[in-house]
Amino acid sequence: MSSLSRALTGDELTFDLHEQVAELREDEHYLRSGRIGRTLVKEGPLRLTLTVIAEGVAADTHHAASPMTLQILEGRLRYRVGDQKFEISRGEVLFFGPGHAQDIRALEDTALLLTITGEGPDAGDLFHAHSND
């Protein structure tokens, strides 16, 4: 569904995440870069972005000014907090504050939901992935 024909805000929005992930994985930008995001909800300070990252591709994070969550729908990610490395996989949710999780990389083809509750230039742009929102 193109950005011109889908609402980013409303009283009730429903998404078929399997269908959305499949569409993103066929997108030309994803096929070239190995990552892409699609904003699903943009309401006040809330941003919900579906992101897919190919195995071995880094998320290219930067320091967001707001806390956020990553909910893994498929695959596995590795990330670093300080000097420690961690993994998160399907069915798990990671909460982290501004700048806490770094060096995020897909260990498998991964699909995730990124939720940010903050406004500013970096809201929803955690992964520097081309967003077709």
Image (cartoon, rainbow, N blue to C red):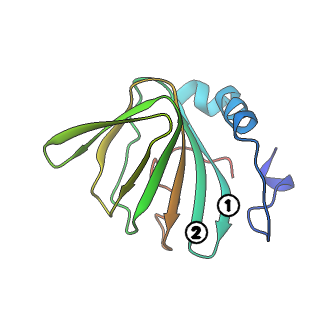
Count all numbered tags in the image, as a single digit. Answer: 2
Label 1, residues with CA under 10 Å away: few <14, some 14-19, many ≥20? some
Residue 5 percent across, percent down from the top left: 86, 53
The one nearer the camera, 31 or 50, is: 50
Left or right of 110 on screen, residue 15: right
Question: What amino acid is labelled 1 in the image?
Answer: Val
Q: Name the residue that disc number 2 marks.
A: 46
Left or right of 3 on screen, residue 106: left
Residue at image point 58% right, 63% down: 47
Residue 51 percent across, percent down from the top left: 56, 42
Outermost residue on the front side: it is 91
Specify the quadrant of the image occupied by residue 52: top right
Q: Tags 2 and 1 in contact by the CB under 8 Å rule? A: yes
Question: What amino acid is labelled 2 in the image?
Answer: Leu
Give the alpha-carbon distance from disc 2 to disc 1, as whole Å: 7 Å
41 w.r.t. 59: above or below:
below
Residue 18 percent across, percent down from the top left: 71, 34
6 w.r.t. 23: above or below:
below
Specify the quadrant of the image occupied by residue 37: top right
Residue 14 percent across, percent down from the top left: 78, 53
Residue at image point 39% right, 24% down: 56
Q: Name the residue that disc number 1 marks.
A: 41
